[in-house]
Amino acid sequence: MKSIHVKHIKLCVFCKHWYDPTNQHIKPKNILGGVWSYDEKAKSVCAITGTPKQAVSACNKFELKV
């Protein structure tokens, strides 16, 4: 799992439109600092486009879920 500061990047794995209801592909590392770990190889469906997206994909409809 890779770690990243969620305020500086807009990856699908952290978007509320990316289907991951149990948040199994993300884990907090330092919540106060905004650092989270994520599974870069995960794939799920985007609720907006209805197509499978990789965790490291991005689009202009991003909305942070954490």
Image (cartoon, rainbow, N blue to C red):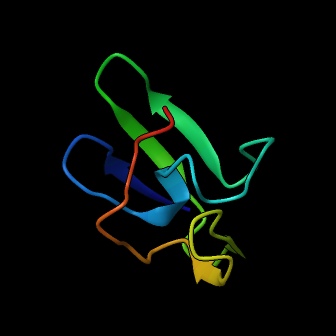
Q: Is residue 35 left or right of residue 28?
A: left
> Foreground residue, 50 or 31?
50
Relative vertical location of residue 16 with respect to residue 60 in this rendering, above or below: above
Whether 9 is drawn above or below 5: the answer is below
Residue 23 image position (x, y, % from top left): 71, 44
Q: Residue at x 19, y 49 (%)?
A: 8
Q: Residue at x 55, y 46 (%)?
A: 16
Q: Nearer the viewer, residue 27 or 53?
A: 53
In which quadrant of the rendered view does residue 13 lie? bottom right
Outermost residue toward the right?
Answer: 22
Q: Is residue 30 left or right of residue 25?
A: left
Camera-side residue: 6 or 59? 59
Q: Quadrant of the N terminus?
A: bottom right
Q: How many marks?
A: 0
Q: Residue 45, located in which quarter of the rendered image?
A: bottom right
Q: Residue at x 28, y 24 (%)?
A: 33
Q: Residue 11 appears at what percent x and percent y?
A: 40, 63
**Rendering coords of residue 5 (x, y %):** 28, 44
Q: Residue at x 41, y 41 (%)?
A: 64
Q: Residue furthest left?
A: 8
Residue 53 % position (x, y)? 59, 80
